[in-house]
Image: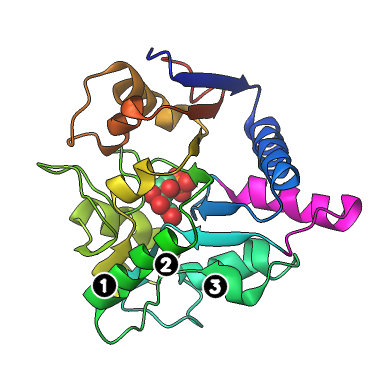
Amino acid sequence: MHPNIQIIIEADYEAMSRKGAQLFAEAMRAKPNSVFGLPTGSTPEGLYKELVRMHKDEGLDFSAVTTFNLDEYYPIERESEQSYYHYMQKHLFGHVNAGESRINIPNGKAEDASKEAAAYEEAIESAGGIDLQILGIGMNGHIGFNEPADSFGADTRHVPLTEITIASNARFFASADEVPRHAVTMGMRSIMTAKRIILMASGEGKAGILRDSFLGPVTPLVPASVLQLHPNVIVLADKDAAGLL
Ligand code: F6R
């Protein structure tokens, strides 16, 4: 394992989520105006739930934070139940005191997705870059919508979804036909410029890809493997996901 990568293994999903929230809250308390990069998906639901609890019970204060979500489908209406905008409202922003104007999620209804992506990249830069990036990982090693490819996708950009991702995300839609065919995603270079990264993974199903990402070669065929080159990464996994590390 690369010396820059710290592995934290927790007993189960709940313990992993609590640990993630603790690290997140520590970053917020140390720097109340932190810039966070945020994922959606099943993995961070427990993290967001615990952060909401900490806000309600312990007064964890989100008022000065800036957030950038990793990605959004394109095209999609904000109001759509499957949008990542909706997901973030449901799991986090609807329950904490984050300032609306400092919450950033790519606009799934932008007229020009490429322009939206370029503006998003600029907004991350103007905010001073991301202090702490939270990530999930796809079964094929994807990060955001950066899928296995011949080269690491660089900047925030407009991408077509792969058949595998369409099939896997179809569980959130009435049918695979309804899954949007594109997305706007932060690129691997945008993600790599974050000062700190915590990648979270839970369940046996993620064990193989964690091994390939962190013990295998750095290759764009496994997008997460590039994290081996980042100076400050924590892999936060439950026992099942860490089984092959
Ligand atoms: C979501 C995202 C995706 C997910 C990945 C894992 O914003 O960027 O890359 O992190 O697909 O998803 P789950 O957590 O549902 O296994």
For disc 1, the marked residue is 177
Instruction: Determine crowd level at label 3: few under 14, some 14-19, many 20+ residues with C-alpha closer than 10 A.
Output: some
Position of residue 207 measured from the top left corner of the image (x, y, whole percent):
41, 24
Cα–Cα span, label 2 and label 1: 33 Å
Residue type at mark 3 is His
Q: Which is more N-terminal, label 2 or label 3?
A: 3
Q: Secondary structure at mark 3?
A: helix
Cα–Cα span, label 3 and label 2: 21 Å
Q: Secondary structure at mark 1?
A: helix
Residue type at mark 2 is Ala
170 left or right of 25?
A: left
Q: Residue at x 73, y 50 (%)?
A: 51
Q: Which is more N-terminal, label 1 or label 2?
A: 2
Position of residue 234 measured from the top left corner of the image (x, y, whole percent):
51, 28
Relative depth, front residue between 156 and 150: 156
Residue 94 drawn in magenta: no
Residue 120 visible here: yes
Residue type at mark 1 is Asp
User: Where are the magenta residues, as a range?
Assistant: 44-63
For disc 2, the marked residue is 123
